[in-house]
């Protein structure tokens, strides 16, 4: 016997086995946790939305790393673009993780900050490397004493 009910958030109709009654499952469309209603005969006892457990969402480690690397990408010792590129890569990884689990993982603003600083750091590193190259060319062209 199956239990048929609708998701309270996205109104998708779900048809699940009655063996899952009372358990929390993720809605295939909106990914929120829904408790499968308990069925007694033909009448459903509970169709109310049950929020996910009240555990605090954790901060995404990739978001923190992206923001820290984005900050470090502005230091003059970071002429190479490795650190800002890592900030951008980790920022995108953080956003993907946060978007997949919005109720479990937080840190979207940190990820975006790391992305912005990483992209600015890449541009800054490219400009510094080009300037360094042309400065070397100019110094090499000067007559030697």
Image (cartoon, grey):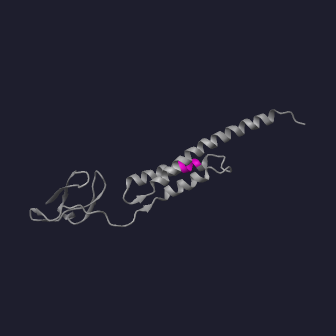
Q: Residue at x 63, y 40 (%)?
A: 126
Q: Quadrant of residue 31?
A: bottom left
For the record, the magenta segment spans: 84-88
Vertical position of residue 113 compared to residue 144: above or below: below
User: Residue 103 or 26: which is nearer the viewer?
Assistant: 103
Whole-percent x and y of residue 67?
A: 54, 54
| Residue 34 is one of the magenta-drawn residues | no
Q: Where is the N terminus found, in terms of image quarters?
A: bottom left
Whole-percent x and y of residue 61?
A: 49, 59
Q: Where is the C terminus found, in terms of image quarters?
A: top right
Vertical position of residue 18 compared to residue 86: above or below: below
Whole-percent x and y of residue 30?
A: 30, 52
User: Residue 69 or 110: which is nearer the viewer?
Assistant: 110
Magenta highlight: main SS: helix
Q: Is residue 88 left or right of residue 40?
A: right
Outermost residue to the left: 42
Outermost residue to the right: 145
């Amino acid at each position: 016997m199956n239990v048929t009910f609708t998701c309270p958030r996205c109104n998708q109709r779900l048809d699940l086995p009655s063996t899952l009654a009372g358990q929390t499952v993720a809605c295939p469309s909106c990914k929120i946790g829904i408790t499968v209603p308990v069925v007694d005969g033909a009448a459903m006892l509970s169709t109310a939305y049950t929020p996910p457990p009240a555990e605090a969402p954790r901060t995404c480690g990739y978001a923190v790393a992206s923001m820290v690397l984005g900050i470090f990408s502005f230091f003059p010792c970071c002429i190479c673009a490795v650190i800002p590129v890592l900030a951008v890569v980790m920022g995108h990884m953080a956003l993907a993780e946060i978007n997949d689990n919005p109720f479990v993982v937080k840190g979207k603003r940190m990820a975006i900050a790391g992305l912005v600083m990483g992209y600015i750091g890449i541009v800054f590193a490219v400009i510094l490397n080009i300037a360094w190259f042309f400065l070397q060319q100019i110094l090499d062209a000067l007559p030697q004493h």
